[in-house]
Each structure stands twice: as structure tokens, then as C-alpha cells.
Image (tube, grey):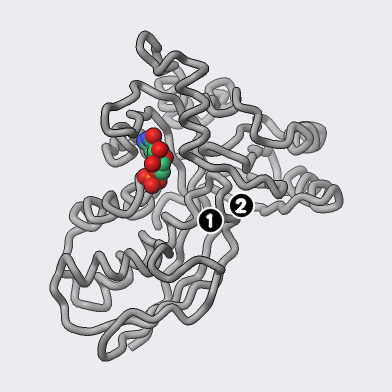
Amino acid sequence: MTLSVKAFAKINLFLDIEARRDDGYHDILSVMQSIDLCDDITLEKIERGIELSNDIGIEKERDLAYRAAAAFFGAVGARGGVRISVDKRIPMGAGLAGGSADAAAVLRGLNSLYGDPLSKKELAELGLTLGSDVPFCVIGGTKITRGRGEKMTDMPAMPDCPMVVAIGDDHVSTPAQFAELDRRFDNFVSYRPKSECVDGLFEAFSNESAAIEKYLYNIFEITGRFSPEIKEIMTSCGARGTLMSGSGSSVFGIFRNDADAAEAADKLTESGYRAFMCRPINNI
Ligand code: C5P
């Protein structure tokens, strides 16, 4: 039996930090949004074992898709195995949760192949053992996220709009980015996150005429790990707003119409960036 699952990327429309924790993580405050940029994952039920039928240059045991399958079989004690094939489009190390999306899709797909032994909530909990962004990628849509990213609150869906996500060749290390923020913000001891932006986005999504762009914010932008030229090109093509996603280095732009977004994607590609036209997605 074979199943195809889509692994949708995420962007952060808002990302800030509430506190540095003793366990090495940070409590974040974020508005996460699924987008239709995705990897295609095929899962084939086999007798036993976990096989990865394509090589993305990562050791098998470190590959999040492989680890998700191992975690699933460990949690449900199901007898059987899976052959996983991943057709990758989401750039890696870019702040788009590419690896986490693959892990979440493997969890959801295997759960379905093996008769739904786990609830969505249980899958999200299992996902947290694999990475901070995996719980959101299991649930998807538009969510306010806290904690490591696993505490999710509903939010009105982001209104449909054309977007472009673009990236240069800068691979960013998330732990190094958090460490850089710790230095700049004195370990967040007396820091207050810009939670008014979350309220602003909530309001803007409830009332489609309100300006989303006023509330786009990502604390990681201060580290400068993105190409300003991407933002310049997007803005020159009419983007309403642009923001780096996650700890970088991808940047997304929100556009008024498809023609502007297509022009931006073309210009970005001509300038040597990888650019993807995409839209928000609310049911994954
Ligand atoms: O959970 P994940 O493996 O994606 O996190 C990678 C690293 O990013 C962690 O080891 C930690 O250094 C940092 N991180 C953090 N706070 C979070 C998420 C990640 O400090 N909420």
C-alpha cells in the first residue's frame, strides 16, 4: 500500500522571544502560517524496517523523515515498516521548516497507513521530540505559537494572497542565531516581546481590509542573515510587506496581485536567487 502526502513549508509572520529557558531553548511568541510550497512524500508499507529511497546528503539516522518514522513505530509498537521517498522543493536551513514539514508529513502519513492509532494532538506531541517546529507542521494553518513552538492557539485564517519566498545560498545555523540574540538582548532577562503585533495580525485577519504589513516582525532580522536585495526587488515589484522567515535566511513578500508576485519571482531568479510563488494554506 502506498500513500502520497504533502509536506507544507511554514513562514513566521511574526517571531519574537519571551524568555531564554534553562534547558537551552527559548520560549518564543510567533504567528506561524502554512504555505503551499511543499515537498512531496511517498510512503510505501513494507514488511519491516525504514528505508529512505532518496539521498539528500544527510546521514539516515539524522534525517528527520527517517527519525519521524522511527519515532512513530516506537510510539505505537506497530509491526511493519515503510519505504519513504521525498521529492524536495523546500530549501533546507532556510527558516521554512523544510525538515520539520517532512517529519510531520511522515507522522501523519504513517498514522493514516497504520489505521490512525494516534490523535493529531498525540502526533504533535511525538513531533516535539523531533524538533520545535514539528508540532506546528503536524497541525498547520494559521496559529499563534508559544513555548518551543508546541503551544498553539487558533487564529483567524490568513486571507488568501499571492506571496513569493526567496533565498540566496546562505545556510543559517538556528542555534548560532539564538546565541547571537542572547548576546544582543542580554539573555532576554528584562525583554518584552512585541505582542501588540500578534493582536494586530489577529485583528487584520478578522477584518480583511486591515493592513497586515504593519504587524510583520521577526526579531532575527537584526542578525542580518538575509539578502537585503531580495527585499528591495520584492518592494520594487509592489510587495505590501516583506520579512525574513524563522532564523533565516529566506525572505517572503506579500503581494496585491499575481502579476506583481510573478514579476518579483522572475526578477529574483534573474538575480540568482531561488524564488517560489506561493499562497497561504489553511487546511493541510
Ligand atoms: O528544536 P530544534 O531541534 O529545531 O532546535 C534547534 C536549536 O534551536 C535548539 O537546539 C536550540 O538551540 C534552538 N532553539 C531554541 N528555542 C526554540 C527552538 C530552537 O533555542 N524555541
The residue that disc 2 covers is: 278
Residue type pointed to by label 1: Asp
Place of residue 205 in the rendered image (x, y in percent of width and height, measured from the top left): 46, 31
The C terminus: image quadrant:
bottom left
Q: Residue at x 27, y 78 (%)?
A: 113
The residue that disc 1 covers is: 36
Q: Is residue 142 in sight in this rendering?
A: no
Report the residue that reaches farthest toward the right: 270
Q: Residue at x 42, y 30 (%)?
A: 206
Residue 124, compared with residue 47, is above or below; it is: above
Q: Nearer the viewer, residue 230 or 236?
A: 230
Residue 127, compared with residue 215, is above or below; it is: below
Place of residue 39 in the rendered image (x, y in percent of width and height, measured from the top left): 52, 65
Place of residue 14 in the rendered image (x, y in percent of width and height, measured from the top left): 48, 29
Residue type pointed to by label 2: Cys
Q: Residue at x 79, y 35 (%)?
A: 229
Q: Secondary structure at mark 2?
A: strand
Place of residue 224 in the rendered image (x, y in percent of width and height, measured from the top left): 65, 28
Q: Quadrant of residue 198?
A: top left
Question: In the image, 190: left or right of 77?
Answer: right
Q: CA distance from mark 2 to mark 1?
A: 6 Å
What is the crowding at mark 2: few (fewer than 14 residues within 10 Å), some, or many (at least 20)? Answer: many
Q: Nearer the viewer, residue 192 or 177?
A: 177
Q: Is residue 154 in sight in this rendering?
A: yes
Q: Residue at x 21, y 77 (%)?
A: 114
Whether the residues at callouts 2 and 1 have beta carbons within 8 Å, the answer is yes
The N terminus: image quadrant:
bottom left
Q: Secondary structure at mark 1?
A: strand
What is the crowding at mark 1: few (fewer than 14 residues within 10 Å), some, or many (at least 20)? Answer: some
Residue 95, compared with residue 28, is above or below; it is: below
Q: Quadrant of residue 80?
A: bottom left
